[in-house]
Image: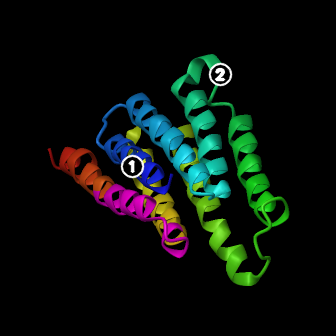
Amino acid sequence: MTLIAQIISIFAMAMNVLSFQNKVKRNAIAFQFFGGLLFSVSFFMLGAFVGGLLNLIGVARSIVYINEERFKAKNPIWLVIFITLYFTSYVLTFTVFGKDFNFTSMLIELLPVIGMIATNVSFAMNGAKAIRFLGLISSPSWLIYNIVNLSIGAILCEVFSIFSIIIGIIRFDIKRKEK
C-alpha cells in the first residue's frame, strides 16, 4: 500500500511541476487539479488525512477556477469559502484527527494552510504569473511540512516545484521583460 501511494505521489508531483511551465492560467490550474487529486489519494493511503483533506479542497478549488465564468470565480466569496475550509481543516487536525495540540504542532500544521491560501489567492488573480510568484510562498510552506512529516514523494514534489517556478519566472517573466 505504501509503495502504491509513493508511485501515485510521483505522478502527482509530475502534474504539479508541469503546471508552472504553462503560459495559460487555465492549463496551469488543470495540471494542479490532477496533481491535487493524486496527492489526495496518496496522502489518504499513507494515513496523512490533513494533507489528503487539504488536497481535496484544492481539487474543488481548481474546478471553480478552471470554470471561472461559469462559477463566477472572480467573486471574492470563493476566496472566503476556501480559506474558511482550510482553517476548518486546521481545526479538525487537532479535534477529529487527534493531533497533539502544542506550539510546534500548531505551527507545523499551519504551514500547508498558508500554502493553500497562497495558491488560492494566485488562482483568483489574472494570469499564470501570479501562480508562479505565489508558488514561492506555497511550495516552501508545504516543503517544510512534508519534511517534518517525512513524506518523500511530497518533499521531491516541492523541491522540483520550486525549481520549476524559478525556471518559469525566468522564462516567462524576466526574459519577456528583457525583450
| Residue at left offset 74%, top offset 36% | 77
Q: CA distance from mark 2 to mark 1?
A: 33 Å
Q: Say what secondary structure mark 2 lies in.
A: helix
Few, some or many residues within 10 Å of mark 2 (<14, 14–19, 20+): few
N-term mark: 2 or 1: 1
- The amino acid marked with disc number 2 is Phe
| The C terminus - image quarter | top left
Q: Residue 101, how many percent across, how many down? A: 80, 76
Residue 38 against residue 158 in the figure, above or below: above
86 left or right of 114 in image: right
Instruction: Kindly identify which residue carries mark 2.
Output: 71
Q: How many marks?
A: 2
Few, some or many residues within 10 Å of mark 1 (<14, 14–19, 20+): some
Residue 151 among those drawn in magenta: yes
Which image quarter: residue 162? bottom left
Q: Residue 178, how many percent across, how many down? A: 16, 50
- Of badges 2 and 1, the one in the foreground is 1
Instruction: Kindly identify which residue carries mark 1.
Output: 7
Residue at the extreme front: 1
Q: Nearer the viewer, residue 160 or 49?
A: 49
Q: Nearer the viewer, residue 45 or 21?
A: 45
Residue extent of the magenta highlight: 146-163
Q: Say what secondary structure mark 1 lies in.
A: helix
| Residue at left offset 37%, top offset 41% | 15
Which image quarter: residue 159? bottom left
- The amino acid marked with disc number 1 is Ile
Q: Residue 128, how many percent across, how many down? A: 39, 39
Q: Residue 153, how many percent across, how many down? A: 41, 59
Which image quarter: residue 21? top left
